[in-house]
Amino acid sequence: MNSYKRISLFILSLHSCILFSQNIENKYITRSGYIDFFSSTPIEDIKAENKTVGSILNSKNGDFVFEVMMKSFKFKNFLMEQHFNEKYVESDEFPTATFHGKINDFKYSYLKESIELPVSVSGFLSIHGVEKEITTNGTLRLKGNQIIATSSFILKPEDFQIKIPAIVRNNIAKEVQIKVYVELSPM
Amino acid sequence: MKTKKLLFITAFIFSFNYSFSQEKLLDLLNNKKEKQLIRSTFKDSKVINLQSNEMPAKNQLQFIISHRFGKLNDGAYNLWGLDNSQIRFHLSYGITNWISLGLGRSSNNKVYDGWIKYKLLQQSVGRKNIPISLTGYNAIFIKTLKDVTIPDSCSCFANKISYANQLIISRKFSKNTSLEIVPTLLHYNIVDVPNYKNDVFAISIGGRQKITRSIALNVEYNFLLTKNNPDNSNSLSVGFDIETGGHVFQLHLTNAKGMIESEFIGNNTGRWQNGDIYFGFNISRQFNVKKKNNS
């Protein structure tokens, strides 16, 4: 019985050492990530930028998450911003958009300074209370001790039940271009 | 026996599987809560007649045309008031996000008005919890209607002036419901009868209830705390806001003839029960005035 106890204790302490190292070294974070979206129609172009995006990358397994405050999207035209928040994305009810997923086949050792590594990311994107599975491409590279992740992709407002009233239907494109740029620092 | 125990222990360890799940990563991001300002308590800068806490944003120009017809009890001959009408133009500009200036002109008594509106406090949640918004409003009214009943000795410029001062206390209770209370001090440089007071105090209540994404119901009631003329009545108005793209249309019924504070609060004699009901509509449009250095 005594040796049993000793072995269990040893294994538990080993276990906590493993946990400890897992906790510390692998997460890269930012709270000032950049996302913008752009819609172009013959009637007008709409662009908004969000500069306070939160994101964490787990470099151990490629887990990648984003949290975006919808009210932090800034437009040049205040009326557009008001309509965006109140009528389209209803940001009082759905204040954040989130993404949780992972970088496919991620290995930290693949990352290099000044070389953009093309990667594909898969996961679940939740906007306006609607969750959708997406896979998209992006790039990763090292800059000093930071990881820089970028991606460009297209989203359709209708996929997230964002209803555009008929009267402005032609002002907003059916496909909106999204651009993501985050500089992640070790946590 | 020993290998069995070892196997058991190894299995025990691996069952832990203590990797940081994606949900846990999201939780890590969550602990910073920013202060979030509550916006759009009311659709527009006026509930119906009454000022709301809203004003044009920085570099925004707002233009409102207000149209008020005559009284319902004007009878069939006057098409229940539709034959009579008066108009007010209103132009306001946001200097910063918390100060705006405006000018207006009403055809009723040919009054020119100018005002300043400023945010003292804005409702917010998150890191800082502020339950109400406070907005200040000061206006000056200049009546230019030539009044033959006033003797020339009294018709100096100062006598044409009256003032309104309001503190708008508002709160957005939910996505669809907002309320405000507005204490008002009016000052008339000249009053009709010698024993009338130049200062009139009133307290007003305004409310907005959103019915659909673009339509809202507005109600306001202006209660006079001091009455000069016993004939003065409290103004009660009911209306709808309809928003379409860049325009806001407001349709309303009110017992007040005037559209400015010196008239609809302090000088109103209309009574709903008598049929002194005026139908009116406002059309409001916002423009963005871009400065050349902003790209």
Image (spheres, coloured by chain):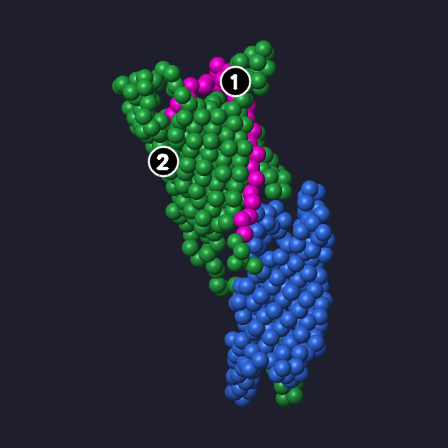
Give amino acid for label 1: Lys
Question: In the structure shown, which secondary structural element does the residue marked by tag 2 occupy?
Answer: strand
Please tell me which residue is depicted at 50% across the width and 49% down the height of the picture. Answer: B59
N-term-proximal mark, 1 vs 2: 1
Q: Quadrant of the N terminus of chain A?
A: bottom right
Q: Colour of chain B?
A: green
Please tell me which residue is depicted at 38% across the width and 25% down the height of the picture. Answer: B266
User: Is B278 part of what is drawn in magenta?
Assistant: yes
Q: Colour of chain A?
A: blue
* Chain on which label 2 sits: B
Please tell me which residue is depicted at 42% across the width and 19% down the height of the picture. Answer: B269
Q: Nearer the viewer, residue B209 or B149?
A: B149
Q: Nearer the viewer, residue A59 or A148?
A: A148
Of the numbered discs in the image, which one, if any, rests on residue B71? 1
Query: How many numbered markers are drawn?
Result: 2
Q: Are marks 1 and 2 on the same chain?
A: yes
Q: Is residue A30 left or right of residue B159?
A: right
* Chain on which label 1 sits: B
Q: Which span of residues is magenta-colored?
A: B266-290
The image position of residue A128, as x and y in percent, is 63, 53
Q: Residues within 10 Å of mark 1 (few under 14, many from 20)?
A: many
Of the numbered discs in the image, which one, if any, rests on residue A121? none
Q: Residues within 10 Å of mark 2 (few under 14, many from 20)?
A: many
Is residue B201 in view?
Answer: no
Give amino acid for label 2: Asn
Check the image and name the residue furthest to the front.
Answer: B152
Q: Is residue B137 left or right of residue B293?
A: left
Q: Nearer the viewer, residue B10 or B108?
A: B108
Please tell me which residue is depicted at 64% across the width and 71% down the height of the picture. Answer: A150
Disc 2 designates what residue? B165
